[in-house]
């Protein structure tokens, strides 16, 4: 019996990486012109953290200052408290020197008002409007907006910067391989 259950779990683990990380339904209707650039999966010690996908207007890797909308979608494979997500985000901004400390603090307060705890299967997607706001969605609705035009590029840089802590996922997101 134990061997049969273990075998089933292993089969499921082999299938999971093939699952696609699509845009959530409210964003699909709003940003129908976005095309997938790449997708991948972040794991830690062999356990899934989230599946991620990057979207742009032409399906190509965005420039450092994109001229068209860009979306980064995360489908969580485990639960996180809102404060954990904010702390991880703030730490990466600091590590990458993406904004002054005061700006990072302001952005973290704004995220605290928008984000919520996530459970396994939940989605959090950022839609970055060039030289404009960043909108956050979950699987069902718009969660909120950050109007600082510097926020969106700093947020997606966590995954797209060449110094990203998730280098393999970065490669998959920009279409240089899958993970």
Image (tube, grey):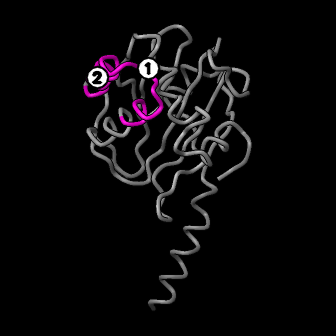
User: What residue is drawn where x is 45% and y is 53%?
Assistant: 49
Tell me where residue 8 appears, x and y as whole percent.
Answer: 53, 77
Give me the C-alpha separation between circle 1 and circle 2: 19 Å
**Which residue is depicted at the point 27% across and 44% down?**
81
Q: Is residue 157 above or below residue 7?
A: above
Q: Image quarter for residue 166?
A: top right
x, y percent for residue 88? 36, 40
* Residue at image mark 2: 105
x%, y% of residue 83?
26, 39
Question: Are the residues at dot 1 and dot 2 in contact (C-beta closer than 8 Å)?
Answer: no
> Which element is circle 2 on?
helix
Element carrying mark 1 = strand
In this view, the mark in front (1 or 2): 2
- Residue 109, quarter of the rendered image: top left
How crowded pointer 1 is (Cα within 10 Å; few <14, some 14-19, many 20+) is rated as many
Q: Residue at x 60, y 53 (%)?
A: 19
Given residues 99 and 139, the one toward you in this image is 99
Q: Is residue 103 magenta?
A: yes
Q: Which residues are magenta?
A: 91-112
Q: Which residue is mark 1?
A: 135
The chief SS type of the magenta part is: helix
Q: Residues within 10 Å of mark 2 (few under 14, many from 20)?
A: few
Q: Nearer the viewer, residue 9 or 107?
A: 107
Quick one: 18 or 83, which is closer to the camera?
A: 83
């Amino acid at each position: 019996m134990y061997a049969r259950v273990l075998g089933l779990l292993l089969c499921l683990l082999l299938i999971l990486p093939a699952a696609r990380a699509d845009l959530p339904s409210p964003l699909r209707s709003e940003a129908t012109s976005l095309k997938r650039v790449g997708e991948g999966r972040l794991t830690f010690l062999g356990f899934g953290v989230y599946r991620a996908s990057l979207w742009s207007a032409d399906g190509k890797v965005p420039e450092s200052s994109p001229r068209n909308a860009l979306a980064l979608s995360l489908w969580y494979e485990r639960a996180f408290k809102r404060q954990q997500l904010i702390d991880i985000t703030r730490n990466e901004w600091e590590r990458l020197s993406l904004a002054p400390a005061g700006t990072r603090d302001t952005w973290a307060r704004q995220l605290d008002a928008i984000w919520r705890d996530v459970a396994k299967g939940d989605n959090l997607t950022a839609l970055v409007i060039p030289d404009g706001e960043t909108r956050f969605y979950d699987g069902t609705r718009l969660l909120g907006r950050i109007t600082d035009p510097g926020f969106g590029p700093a947020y997606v840089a966590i995954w797209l910067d060449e110094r990203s802590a998730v280098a393999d996922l970065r490669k998959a997101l920009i279409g240089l391989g899958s993970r």
